[in-house]
Amino acid sequence: MGNKLTSLLCSRRQRKTNFKRGTTVVDSSDEEELRSGKENKIRSPPTVTLKPSWPVHQIRDALSESPFASIPTEILIQIFRLLSVPDLGNVALVCRSFKLTVDHDEIWRSKCNKTYIDWIYEKYLRNQELEETENAYGLLGTNYSSSSYFCELTDSIQLPSVTGFDEHPNSSEDMIIELSVDIDRTAPELISLLEKASNFKVDWYRPAIIRQMIMRYYQFMQLKASFPDEIFLVPTLDIEIVWQTHLLRPQMYRKDCLRLFHHVIEHSLLIDDIGQFLKEQAFLDTCQFYEERFGEQYCSLLIDKEKIQEALRYHRSLFRSCLTPNYSYWDQTHFQFGSESPKDYENPFSFTEADVILDNNWLDLCKKFMHKSVSKKEYNPPYKIDLGFSPMQLLKKSYERFLYIVTKYPPVDEDKFVHLTYAIEIVWHAHMQEPTKYASDCLRLVGYIMDHTPRIS
């Protein structure tokens, strides 16, 4: 079988050569850059255009008289796994059937574990460079105008209600539904969390550190799953950020929890005054439990008083009336990451390292949208999102309208909803902070659990 595969690949080699010569365009500047090696960390990608010119019948009938037509796909996958990346590229050019088989995740999982995350990190750096170029030339796109909300009704307009909604959302300026999650407190805490994490974005976007964060998150979840929900275990800031990536994919989170821990792990950004009073002792207990079980340090115990005061000042400006914010994670000290990836690293979750990186771009994109919604001036960071009483009322009302729409017009695919603005996503993300309550609200109001995939552009 191996000889037949080699013979078939060789017989197609001339086609591959003609295919490249006739349809691939590469800039000479890119060729010089490729020859120069890895002198620069950030390198512009070559301009490559592929236009396959095979006749349709040739693609369809390529394997009709070949011995490979009778080989099950599972066997082909095991054969192709033994090939190198260049050989897989040659196989993909043989015919459409081989191309679909070569694209199977099972083949590329072992080959792309390191190169894929390195590529996504370079892509992030490239996006930063493009952002600077856009700002330099003023290519910031169209300004958004603030929304006007229709609330006044006439007797001649009949607004239908749907399952879960006793009235149409436009029948009142206030929310006509009740959510189990305290959105007014959770949304500001969520933005505050992302603001704190943005200070570490440059360091935490390194592939080796992302892998350490995911490994620490997995170990923390193992620890949390082994204790009753009443035991207060305190995640560090880096663990909480990975947790956010998981929570914002509700169906994935539920399936992963059931598969790995046999029940859904509860989460909330909020704690009450008693929890806030006990948080420092709970953090010390978490450090002890973690180090006893996994034999490694959980987090430093030295507290920087100046950083605490700075964080409190920021929270007071964000929450206005709240002098001492109560949140469930630990941000007074931070874990010191090593420069190397953890040994025997394996991501047991369904999300990827790239998801963590891309999710942490969401706050910057949200800020730009919010700025353009209220101002025609050019966006200049730092910019603080206003989540005062009036803006929160508008955001919650918009989210209620979104829930009404997805109830009346459920999507064909489970996560292909109406394209929301970043502003409304603030409330949606806040709603997903407590997975059990979120699922209960969805079933009660919408009739099914709404899945979610964070926006990356």
Image (tube, rainbow, N blue to C red):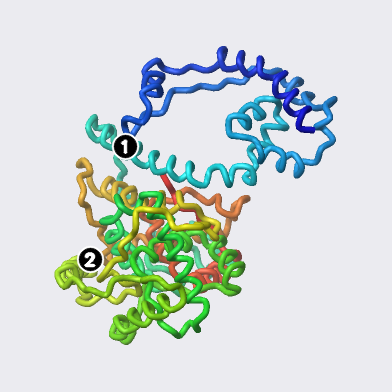
**At label 2, which amino acid type do we have?**
Leu
Q: Looking at the image, is 420 positioned above or below residue 47?
A: below
Q: How many marks?
A: 2
Dot 1 lies on which element?
Answer: loop
Judge whether residue 155 can be spotted in this image. Answer: no
Q: In the depicted view, which residue is nearer to us: 57 or 449?
A: 57
Q: Earlier in the sequence, mark 1 or mark 2?
A: 1
Find residue 62 and report its image quarter.
top right
> In which quadrant of the rendered image does the N terminus lie?
top right
Q: Is residue 393 left or right of residue 429?
A: left
Q: Write down the residue under mark 1.
A: 142
Dot 2 lies on which element?
Answer: helix
**Rendered residue at 46%/77% (across/down):** 293
Question: Where does the image place residue 390, in percent across and percent down from the top left?
Answer: 28, 64
Judge whether residue 259 can be spotted in this image. Answer: yes
Question: Where does the image place residue 314, in percent across and percent down from the top left?
Answer: 19, 65
Q: In the depicted view, which residue is nearer to us: 76 or 275?
A: 76
Report crowding for label 1: few under 14, some 14 to 19, many 20 or more residues within 10 A (C-alpha).
few
**Rendered residue at 60%/34% (across/down):** 84
Q: Is residue 158 left or right of residue 90?
A: left
Question: Where does the image place residue 140, in percent across and percent down from the top left?
Answer: 29, 36
Question: Where does the image place residue 117, in percent across and percent down from the top left?
Answer: 45, 45
> In which quadrant of the rendered image does the C terminus lie?
top left
Report crowding for label 2: few under 14, some 14 to 19, many 20 or more residues within 10 A (C-alpha).
many
**Rendered residue at 22%/68% (across/down):** 315
Find residue 388 and report its image quarter.
bottom left
* Foreground tag (1 vs 2): 2
Residue 318 image label: 2
Circles 1 and 2: CB atoms closer than 8 Å: no
For the residues labelled 1 and 2, the Cα–Cα distance comes to 28 Å
Residue 125 image label: none
**Rendered residue at 36%/23% (across/down):** 36
